[in-house]
Image (cartoon, coloured by chain):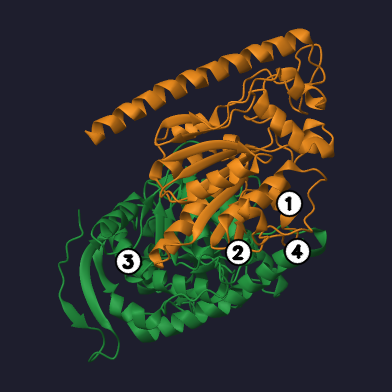
Chain colours: A orange, B green
Amino acid sequence: MGELENKELFKSGHTACAGCGVAVGLRHIMKAIGEDCVIVNATGCVEIFTTAYPKSAWAVPYIHCVFENSAPVAAGVVEALRVQGNDHTKVVVISGDGASYDIGFGHLSGMMERGHDVLYISYDNEAYMNTGVQRSGATPWKAYTTTSQVGSVRKGKQQFKKPLTEIAAAHGIPYAATSTSAHYTDLQQKVKKALSIKGPKFLNVLMTCVPGWGTKPALSMQYLKDAVDAHVWPVYEIENGFLKLNMKPEKKPVETYIKGQKRFKHLNEQDVKEIQELVDEKWDRLLWKEKVDQERKAELEGHSGE
Amino acid sequence: MCTGVSGQVHKNGDGGEVGDIMKKTIEGSFAVAEVVKNCSPDVVACFPITPSTHIAEELDRMYTDGKIKSYTAVESEFSAISMLVGASAAGGRAFTTTDSQGIALMHEVLFAAAGMRLPMVIVAANRSLSAPLSIWNDHQDTISERDSGWIQIYCKNNQEVLDSVPQAFKISEETNIPVMVCMDGFYLTHLVEQIDMPEEEMIEKYLPKRTAEYKLDPENPITMGMYAMPTHYQGFRMDLHKDVINAGENVKKEMEVWGEHSGRKYGNGLWEEYHAEDAEYLFVGMGSVMENAELAIEKMRKEGKKAGLVRIRCYRPFPNEIVESFRGKEGVVVFEKDVSMGADAPLYAELSSVAREKGIETPLSSFMGGLGGKDITVEHIEEMMEKAKEGQVKMVWGE
């Protein structure tokens, strides 16, 4: 990959944990974005581990305001640049799942509905990790967090993960996609593709959290690969409303992904079976949706070609 | 709709020393939108809330007609102020208008915007806060943001609002401190009256294009909105505190400069006095009620009563020196349209504290009233002044 040779715009010396999946993902993302950008970041892990005054890990313009407003702050940057006649600088939000799925959800929705030229990247490590691992709308079913604990009354999070990528796509935006920190070729291609499109774009990237998931630092990338191989985190893109799966790996059992993660260690055989059923059902549905979408796309393209 | 122009163009003063003045009979809100347009904002983002909505609608119309460069109808006041943060950080001149629940919803970002030292202007159409819900006027909304780090200017009439908006942009961009121009909801926003519209040409001479000292620029990348550990946090906050205090000088200076351009001045910019010097009793307050107070003072003077008033125009920074005008008076009536639940009224408490510090023994009386649009008339003001003659009073005015 040429992008790995590019200049480092996300610098070393930050204070992320060893094995942080987010730091790895950020490095790849920044190489794909390039220098001509403005990064807007919500309060969260990234903000804390990259911007402790007076040090910054950012070699590009960066702004953080509060937890829930990265989408409208980005919209404001875009408007100011437009008025200044700047039609080249890319405005990119990089915010966590808490900011994207939960507290900033309404503002993200508003930004997408209004059509601002912003690439919104949600780095999804599946809980409020910065405050010490509390459940978010992105936390998976049955997972342990400090606010979805395991005891006699309940065992982990009782609710399903919010389908944010599909919700984003449902706004009618031109591009929504998923990826992970480990699949950097896919990730960088998607960032570049998104930046070539005008309007709001949404990229949802799964990134490991060593303390939050309770995993070994050395295995951060392996868990992301397993998440994709077990069909737990399908990698797809929805372009102009048409879904396409970018990877269809031969399915590994969900257990390969779950095992070794402390947040899932309370699960028994029955729990794992139920999760497997959920994963299978969602995967089948995605395959069905892809088929319908691609047939429809071909049909429309056929019509326009006549 | 009252956007129509009834007036003729005429020169102010005696022969065009100052800029062209356009007399218009116009609703306060539409006039505000026009003066904002004349200030050439780069980014405007608004969310509708009574009684500021007409300003937002008019700005949208101006964008639609190509008269302002940008207008975004956002999904909340929270996003409006957040867009201003992004726009200002990118070097743009940014404006919004709101009030009441809108101000309350912005609360978090108001503090952040000031802390990040981002210039921007809000026209706040003062309205009460829930609960119970009320759309009518008082000052609880903006008074509640007194500690946010914003400069706050309270206006007595629509002319003053029009004169204050260009000053607000200039003060804000010179000090890197955001400014709130407060106008009473309905009493001013919906009042149709004759005003002199500060025209674009005059404002261009007064207000230079914004040149941001620092901004989001790929040619010169900087990090904005960092977090600070205990070693640095207090320093940042105290720097802002000092700079807001020092911004009082900018407020005074800009009143002078604006006066030269427009021919209009409001006291020294921080406060305005009316028959104060030889008065035995003073009426002190903020906002449009002070025009009623001027009438009350005139009336009382005619009756031989030595009454005067001091109107606080700039509430933040707080003009401590204002209390010097209290020295040697028989009494001072502090009237305010707000309440600090469970404590003395904010304006009274601040004035009392400063007066005591400066060894001023004049008794200060506190009247809280006019909440949620309860009318304060000329007669009420006379009655309050009479009450204060009995000695120091602390009371709620009206049921």
* In the image, residue A111 above or below residue A304: below
Residue A273 falls in which quadrant of the image? top right
Which is closer to the viewer, label 3 or label 1? 1
Most foreground residue, B138 or A45:
A45
Give the labeled residue for mark 2: B364
Q: Circle 3 — which element? A: helix
Secondary structure type for disc 2: strand
Helix, strand or loop status at disc 1: helix
Three-letter residue code for mark 4: Lys
User: Chain under label 2?
Assistant: B
* For residue B201, above or below residue A108: below
* Chain letter behind tag 4: A
Residue topped by disc 4: A55
Label 1 CA crowd tier, 10 Å (few <14, some 14–19, many 20+): some
The residues tagged by marks 3 and 1 sit, at their Cα atoms, a distance apart of 39 Å
The residue to which callout 3 is attached is B37
How many dots with numbers?
A: 4
